[in-house]
Amino acid sequence: MQMFKTAFGLCVEGDLQEIIHVLSSPENSPVKSIFLVTSFSLTFVLRPRHSEDNKTKVLQYMSYNSEELASSNSSDDDDHIKYYDDNAALPIYYSGRNRGLDVDEIVNILLSPDLATSQKVATEKPVAVSRSVAFVLDIRHFKDVKDVLADSLGVWTSTGTKTAYCIQDNSRFIMTNANNYGNDDDIFKIERRFFKHKVEQDVKKNLTVIKNRDGSPHHYCYLQYQFTSGEKKIKPQPHGNASVSTRPFKPSEASTKTRLKQLVQTSTPKAAVDLLLEEKGGIENISSAGEFARDRQQAANFRRGVKEKANRVSSSCPDPLVAVMDKCKMEQRDPKLVFIREISSAPELLVVLATNYQLAEVKRFCTNPSRFSVLGVDVTFNIGEFYVCLTTYRDLMLKTKAGIHPVMLGPILLHQRKLFSSYHSLPSTMIRLDPDLRGVLAFGTDGEIALSQAFESCFPFALHLLCDMHMEDTITSKLRELRIRGSDSQQYMSDIFGQRNEASSKKSLVESSSREEFVKRLEA
């Protein structure tokens, strides 16, 4: 272990603060255990296998810096990369290990900044594995991370899942709890799934996937096979669900099943199977059984399942168009309480929602030249088959405890397509209900062209602004992708958007009023 600086005879009892991990040592090692502890700098303390007085005795005191942590987790035989079945796209990370790695060991492997250049990242999934081996796979080469589980080895039984969390502190990764998930840019969720082979009970595998704060998977996953009784070839057996079938079961990839379910909605089972094969580029481009439908019966089963689901939904749920039209008619009895303003059923279902109070407040705060609020417009999420386009404004008569004007909800549009004609129905309906709303002075969007053009056509005097929140999210995501974090990331955000405190006199790039001023601030 070249990275360690060994110092004999040092007293370390006073430095130790907390044992955070224990690593087992090899049987032929003179050391019983290795304890990873925290002190003023991280240290390793080695303890003897036997001592004459049966008391713990420190043999060596070894320190290392945090940058060396990633390299300490490098795989076996770093100088000689081995490939499974001589496949250059399938480098082996570990070989011959029956012990599963601890979660913090896997975290330091998958999140190591040196992993991408280590040449030990696989871009194809392993199939027909026959010995204890582990892989680090780049999930960007798979349509679904669960595709790596379709390994042509027959039926696996799930034996459990485990979830853990960690945060990044400079170049260290520290385990934490679920309460912090979603509150920190540098927190990661670790999901581990464990399996045992249905026939060969001594064969196990586990898959570890790391997810970012927004739920998106990290670039790499860890897949390990454990053959505790030694190397063996596994012959897939029938699944067991079909009483008459004797054909070996080979599971399909998750992405293959998803696509096949989509195809059977508009095609016969035979046509769906043929289309799937055509999309794959023909049988010569199929590298494993999981990439293709098992047979026509699988497609037929999916088609039957889709129809049964559709029948259940249609029988249990009323027609949404009929329901919303009935609600609209009921509201017309009292014009003061109207919320559903307009319904269009073709070529798409459109519903405009707005109260009299919302329309009056938008007019009050968004059309006064002496003091006005920007009308925010954002397509935020899907509800079933519908998009929801929200408008917001700030109530300039109120202030929160933080001293800012609160954001209020304005008129809403439910729609099915993201077209100019779809978005146009919202501002045009607002103006039809109150022509003075044509005088809206500014509106902000996330930059979607169809959305901005629709509002520009209805609000001719309005200035179109880009939403700073969306710009911040976009830039923050790009900085994280480039692994720019901490103070460096904060400096970029400060230069672009300015300081959060009002006492700062530094002007940001977004506050530039001209191209010349922007260039001047950029070069300052």
Image (spheres, rainbow, N blue to C red):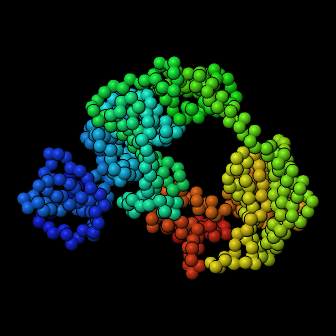
Going by the image, does 188 lie left or right of 366?
A: left
Numbered circles on residues, count:
0
> Residue drawn 45% across and 49% down?
191
Going by the image, does 244 lie left or right of 55?
A: right
Residue 467, compared with residue 1, is above or below; it is below
Going by the image, does 211 lie left or right of 341?
A: left
- Most distant residue in the right direction: 333
- The residue closer to the viewer here, 312 or 337, is 312
- The residue closer to the viewer here, 460 or 200, is 200
> Residue drawn 85% across and 66% down?
356
Residue 225: % across, % down: 35, 37
Residue 100: % across, % down: 32, 44
- Most distant residue in the left direction: 52
Going by the image, does 314 lie left or right of 253?
A: right
Q: Could you say which quadrant of the image residue 19 lies in?
A: bottom left
> Residue drawn 43% across and 44% down?
160
Q: Could you say which quadrant of the image residue 465 lies in?
A: bottom right
Residue 156: % across, % down: 43, 33
Residue 78, compared with residue 495, is above or below; it is above
- Most distant residue in the front direction: 243
> Residue drawn 38% across and 23% down?
235
Q: Is residue 367 visible?
A: no
Q: Is residue 408 visible?
A: yes
Q: Could you say which quadrant of the image residue 40 lies in?
A: bottom left
Residue 423: % across, % down: 78, 52
